[in-house]
Structure formats: structure tokens, C-alpha cells
Image: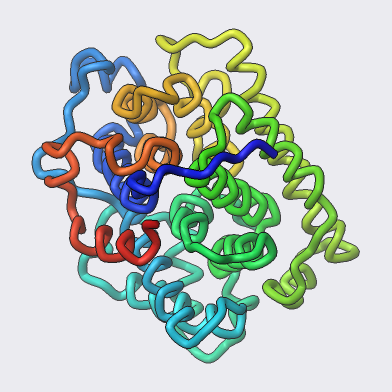
């Protein structure tokens, strides 16, 4: 694995959390629209402007909720599943009841959070048949927390996904997104990112994190925990292969969803965000605009694209006139201050 030491002034956490919110806000008005409709409404995609005001969706709201849960969990010591479940669960339930939860949230998140609001074990609330992108749209903070082991980062990424989306592909896609944010924040080169993620997926394809997931696998039809989790890694490896294929013959003017999927499900959201980022790894606004001008789940695709671009380039990726207008800016910056080196 080729990882270089990131510059001290990079502020990757600020870059990631700002970038994901900007992508979310840019894609909010274009979600559910096809590309011709977006172009008619917004003009040429390379000149798309941040809406005024720059409202975000549940993607950013739940990212903040997860970040707060992690902060609370680590206030009492090292990150463990026992310390993490309660605070993150409480933050998700608080989001569910918030009057600001009015940004067309996903059905799975709503159903699971309603069930989490009670005494039942979280595995009973998890929607094990859902692999919607709600699992990985919010996972980026765990890729930023310093000092975690690979096992802590992977376990926490999968656990936060499983609280709502218990499908193994949702878990694997969340793990991969967190891994990508971590690698880029640490200085990994975009050119080798897909190869590193594929290697990581192969290495973890039979690894079930029992300490973090408990008996979640028993709530499915799988014969063993290894059979359960391997389903998710197989689908994510297939999705990563679609990104590699698309980048061998890049077509920046073509809707990325045509090659890597519409992003409504976890592995496609991961793949299409990687596709958009890797088309323009040194042009973060162009990557965001390309992600927002897509026929699929535009806000989530652009949210993840912004997280990747921010991890790679840091806070300097985003122009001040955009970043200062983003909704929840103070919440995002307070979390980023915890994790910026």
C-alpha cells in the first residue's frame, strides 16, 4: 500500500465534511431528475452553481448525527462497540424525531430509526433486506478519526450501517467508503485507489466482525456469518470492477450513472461517487458538478464524491464563497476540529 504522510496544513476532516455537505446541497435540487431536465434547469453542468440558500438533505444530517455519536463514544475512552452503540443509536433516534427531518429521508432509515426508539436490541431494528445508500452516505467521519486500528474503523463503519441497513452489501460498501476516505486523507494517490480498495475487499471477504455485529447474520437466510458477509463483498467487488472499466475509457460528458449505476443502492453509490471523483481528482468542483448532474441519487452521489475529494485535497479544495454558505456549517466545523491534524 502506497501512503504518504499528509501535509500538516491539509485539514482533511474539514475538507471531507465540507465537501460532502456541498455535494449534498448541489445535488439536492437535481435528485429524481434526468440529465436533460437538469441541464434545462441549471444550464451547462460544468457551470452549475451552489443553490441559495445551500440547504442539505438527510445525508448531511445523518453524517452529523454519526459524528456526534462517535464523539460521545470516545469521550469515555477507546472506541468499542459497547461504547458506540448507545450514543449513535440515540443520535439516529434524535434525528428521526427532529422537525428538521423533512428533506425526503429514505424509507429504510425512517423504519429502522422508529424501531431503534425503544428497548429492543438493535439487530431486531436493522432492515437486513435493505442495501440502500443510506448506509454509506453518512459513514465518512469514521475514516477521519485518528488513532483507530483497521479493525475499529471497519467494525464501526459496518455497525453504523447495520443499525439501519443490515444487508451485507450495505456493510461492505460502508466499510469501503470509510477506507477510501482514510487512505486519501493519509495521502494515498487517487490513481491507485481502486486497486487498494479491491485488495482490501479480497482480504476481508470472509471476515465477519462478530464483536461489532453480534448475531446480525442470524436475522437473514445465510448459513453462517462468513456466508452472510461474503455476499456483500462479492457485490462490492463487482461494483469496483465497473469503476475500473469505466475509467479505462473515460467519458466525462456522459452521465456516470450509465456506467456505474444510479446510486440508489449502496454499492452503486460507492461506485458512481468513485467514478466521478476519479474522473476529476484534481478538480473538486468539476467532480461535484458531474456527480450532481446525474439521473440517479444525485445528492448522495455528490455527497460521497465531495467526501472523497475533500479527503484528497483537504479544506483548500472548496472556495470560501461556497463553504461559508453551507447549512450546518458550524456543526460540521466543530466535528472537523476534533479530527484535523
Q: Is residue 106 above or below residue 293?
A: below
Residue at horizontal 63 percent and vertical 28 percent from the top: 192
Please identify the quarter of the rendering in which residue 281 is found. top left
Quadrant location of the C terminus in the rendered image: bottom left
- Is 219 on the left or on the right of 35, as rendered? right
Please identify the quarter of the rendering in which residue 19 is found. top left
Residue at horizontal 52 percent and vertical 84 percent from the top: 77
Quadrant location of the N terminus in the rendered image: top right
Residue at horizontal 51 percent and vertical 40 percent from the top: 187
- Is 3 on the left or on the right of 307, as rendered? right
Please identify the quarter of the rendering in which residue 315 is found. top left
Q: Is residue 157 above or below residue 262?
A: below
Residue at horizontal 38 percent and vertical 62 percent from the top: 62
Q: Is residue 333 visible?
A: yes
What kind of colouring is applied to the model shown?
A: rainbow
Q: Is residue 265 visible?
A: no
Residue 283 % position (x, y):
35, 23
Residue 12 % position (x, y):
39, 48
Q: Is residue 34 above or below residue 77?
A: above
Residue 49 % position (x, y):
17, 27
Residue 286 % position (x, y):
32, 22
Q: How many discs mark residues in the rendered view?
A: 0
Q: Residue furthest right?
A: 223
183 and 270: which is toward the camera = 183
Amino acid at each position: 500500500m502506497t501512503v504518504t504522510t499528509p501535509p500538516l496544513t491539509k485539514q482533511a476532516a474539514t475538507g471531507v465534511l465540507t465537501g460532502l455537505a456541498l455535494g449534498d446541497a448541489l445535488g439536492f435540487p437535481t435528485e429524481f431528475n434526468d440529465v436533460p431536465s437538469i441541464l434545462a434547469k441549471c444550464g451547462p453542468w460544468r457551470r452549475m452553481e451552489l443553490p441559495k440558500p445551500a440547504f442539505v438533505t438527510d445525508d448531511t444530517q445523518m453524517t452529523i448525527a454519526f459524528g456526534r455519536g462517535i464523539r460521545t463514544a470516545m469521550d469515555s475512552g477507546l472506541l468499542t462497540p459497547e461504547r458506540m452503540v448507545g450514543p449513535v443509536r440515540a443520535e439516529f433516534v434524535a434525528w428521526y424525531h427532529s422537525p428538521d427531518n423533512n428533506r425526503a429521508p429514505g424509507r429504510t432509515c425512517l423504519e429502522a430509526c422508529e424501531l431503534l426508539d425503544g428497548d429492543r436490541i438493535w439487530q431486531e431494528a436493522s432492515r437486513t433486506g435493505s442495501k440502500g445508500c443510506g448506509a454509506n452516505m453518512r459513514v465518512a467521519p469514521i475514516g477521519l478519526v485518528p488513532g483507530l486500528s483497521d479493525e475499529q474503523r471497519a467494525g464501526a463503519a459496518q455497525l453504523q450501517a447495520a443499525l439501519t441497513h443490515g444487508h451485507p452489501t450495505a456493510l461492505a460498501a460502508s466499510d469501503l467508503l470509510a477506507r477510501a476516505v482514510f487512505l486519501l486523507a493519509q495521502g494515498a494517490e487517487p490513481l491507485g485507489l481502486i486497486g487498494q480498495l479491491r485488495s482490501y475487499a479480497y482480504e476481508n471477504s470472509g471476515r465477519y466482525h462478530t464483536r461489532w455485529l453480534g448475531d446480525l447474520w442470524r436475522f437473514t437466510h445465510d448459513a453462517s456469518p462468513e456466508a452472510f458477509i461474503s455476499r456483500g463483498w462479492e457485490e462490492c467487488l463487482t461494483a469496483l470492477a465497473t469503476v475500473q472499466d469505466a475509467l479505462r475509457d473515460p467519458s466525462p460528458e456522459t452521465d456516470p450513472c450509465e456506467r456505474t449505476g444510479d446510486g440508489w443502492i449502496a454499492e452503486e453509490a460507492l461506485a458512481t461517487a468513485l467514478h466521478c471523483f476519479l474522473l476529476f481528482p484534481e478538480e473538486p468542483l468539476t467532480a461535484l458538478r458531474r456527480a450532481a448532474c446525474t439521473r440517479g441519487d444525485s445528492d448522495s452521489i455528490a455527497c460521497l464524491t465531495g467526501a472523497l475529494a475533500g479527503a484528497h485535497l483537504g479544506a483548500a479544495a472548496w472556495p470560501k464563497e461556497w463553504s461559508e454558505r453551507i447549512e450546518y456549517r458550524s456543526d460540521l466545523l466543530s466535528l472537523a476540529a476534533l479530527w484535523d491534524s
